[in-house]
Image (tube, rainbow, N blue to C red):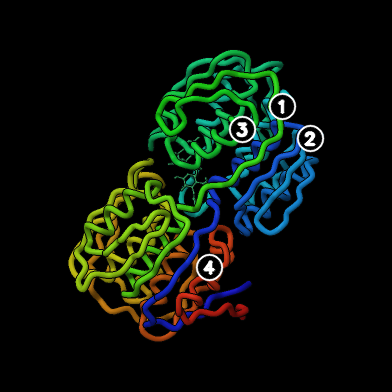
């Protein structure tokens, strides 16, 4: 198992190019199961989650080929069985359920289980599929879904914490091959849902309203192969922007869609970070003095939960008190105790973290608990005095393409070492 050894205190300077979005490519890969024809997906990031999803598609019978950042999938014949050993590795794999059910009328997919950021139920996915006419049972840890035919209907897909991103993706995919019209109310509005809708449309699906809370899908009898380029990763872009500000450097981030992470840019500006836009590039630099800002994570277009941990690091470095409230996942504060090991002063009160910022950080060994927490620890390590060892960075490799290499090019003193 690898760790990252970081020697802090170097401001990041230079240029970085953002990779394709993990959370867009995973459901898009699942959507290739909807057709027997060949699909080509471009700007596919080299991430372990993408490798897992490729293995899942292969285990279902699809032919998966990858050449650099282009992925070719041909699911000429597929079987409807998603094995626990593969599904448990990655929660995102639950989005094979909708396509398999739509194509084969029967699917047996392992329940993905929880993860450190919360219990992560799939009740809304199942509610949506049932509304389309599927009969669902849970047998020995597997979801067994059957439907002679799926029939379009209108449904409300909102839950306790608002809409569901992968739930919306699952239902949208299943509905493309249902008979009649499906209307999803309280659909997730995330750019990744829009990107999936774009790919499905290229495959011949009839979808309108993606990106709004009401998505309408008119079923078609079959879908065909398509080509698609994945959107840039807004969470990766936000992470580099925060890293530039936190280290007090100046970084130009290329190939971004700033409109996809407006809420983050707005909070950075409110805090005093300087952001200059030049087409698809953003130059981010720190103002002389930052101000604390309060943040509440919300569904899109609100502040993303996937950037909460990284933003907390910036607030740890900012003189004053800021309150960070997590409204999407109930236990997404695993980074707090690790940041405390570096010297941060953060108290948890219910769904909020109260950050007393402005204390100097000093390096220490820390343990990554999930993907975004790992990114936060890396940023903190780049600022802290001395050396920080971030352990268990396999989490990081799930969602950031070549992060150590990209950071090294920006001047960071960071190297991968084997864990002892
Ligand atoms: N929820 C339910 N029932 C469901 C589904 C979700 O109650 O059936 C709840 C969840 O427990 C949570 C909320 O609804 O409280 C939102 O969860 P959502 O379903 O939107 O999350 P997801 O689709 O499983 C995706 C991303 C996550 C990201 C969230 C929120 C992928 C592969 N994952 O998860 O990404 O945090 O949306 O934006 O797209 C990450 O990249 O680090 C990551 C965790």
Among the 4 quarters of the image, the one containing residue 227 = top right
On-image quarter of the C terminus: bottom right
Residue that protrudes farthest toward the bottom in the picture: 386
Q: Disc 1 or 3, which lies upstream in sequence?
A: 1
**Residue named by callout 3:** 202
**Residue named by callout 4:** 403
Q: Disc 2 or 4, which lies upstream in sequence?
A: 2
Q: Where is residue 127? Give x, y as percent.
A: 53, 25
In depth, the one of 201 and 178 nearer the eye is: 201
**Residue named by callout 1:** 103
Numbered disc 1: secondary structure: helix
Residue contact at pointers 1 and 2, CB within 8 angstroms: yes
In this rendering, the label closer to the viewer, 2 or 4? 4
Q: State how far apart marks 2 and 3 are (Cα).
A: 21 Å
The answer to whether residue 306 is visible is yes
Mark 3: C-beta under 8 Å from nearest atom of ligand 1 = no
The answer to whether 329 appears left or right of 319 in the picture is: right
In this rendering, the label closer to the viewer, 3 or 4? 3
Q: State how far apart marks 3 and 4 are (Cα).
A: 31 Å
In depth, the one of 154 and 11 nearer the eye is: 11
The answer to whether residue 140 is visible is no
Numbered disc 4: secondary structure: helix
């Amino acid at each position: 198992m690898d760790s990252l050894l970081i020697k802090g205190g170097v401001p990041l300077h230079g240029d970085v190019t953002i990779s394709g979005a993990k959370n867009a490519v995973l459901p898009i890969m699942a959507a290739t199961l909807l057709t027997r024809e060949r699909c080509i997906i471009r700007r596919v990031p080299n991430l372990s989650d993408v490798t897992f999803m490729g293995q899942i598609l292969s285990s279902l019978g699809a032919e998966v080929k990858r050449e650099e950042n282009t992925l070719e999938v041909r699911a000429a014949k597929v079987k409807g069985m998603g094995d626990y050993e593969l599904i448990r590795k990655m929660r995102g794999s639950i989005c094979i359920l909708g396509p398999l059910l739509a194509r084969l009328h029967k699917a047996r997919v392992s329940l993905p289980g929880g993860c450190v950021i919360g219990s992560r139920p799939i009740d809304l996915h199942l509610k949506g599929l049932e509304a389309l006419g599927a009969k669902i049972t849970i047998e020995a840890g597997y979801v067994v879904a059957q439907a002679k035919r799926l029939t379009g209907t209108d449904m409300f897909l909102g839950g306790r914490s608002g809409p569901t991103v992968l739930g919306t993706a699952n239902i949208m995919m299943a509905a493309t091959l249902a008979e009649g019209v499906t209307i999803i109310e309280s659909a997730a509005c995330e750019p990744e849902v829009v990107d999936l809708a774009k790919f499905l449309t290229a495959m011949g699906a009839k979808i309108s309203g993606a990106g709004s809370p009401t998505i309408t899908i008119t079923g078609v009898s079959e879908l065909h192969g398509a080509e698609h380029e994945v959107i840039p990763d807004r969470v990766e872009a936000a992470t580099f922007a925060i890293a530039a500000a936190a280290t007090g450097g100046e970084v130009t981030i290329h190939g971004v869609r700033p409109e996809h992470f407006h809420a983050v840019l707005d909070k950075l500006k409110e805090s005093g970070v300087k952001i200059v836009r030049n087409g698809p590039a953003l130059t981010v630099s720190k103002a002389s003095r930052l101000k604390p800002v309060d943040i509440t994570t919300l569904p899109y277009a609100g502040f993303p939960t996937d950037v909460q941990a990284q933003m907390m690091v910036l607030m740890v470095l900012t003189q004053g008190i800021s309150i960070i409230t997590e409204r999407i996942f109930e236990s997404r504060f695993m980074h707090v105790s690790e940041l405390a090991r570096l010297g941060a002063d953060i108290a948890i009160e219910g769904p909020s973290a109260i950050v007393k910022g402005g204390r100097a950080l000093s390096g220490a060994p820390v343990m990554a608990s999930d993907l975004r927490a790992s990114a936060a620890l890396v940023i903190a390590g780049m600022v802290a005095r001395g050396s920080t060892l971030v352990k268990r960075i396999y989490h990081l490799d799930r969602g950031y393409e070549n992060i150590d290499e990209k950071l090294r090019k920006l001047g960071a003193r960071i190297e991968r070492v084997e864990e002892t």
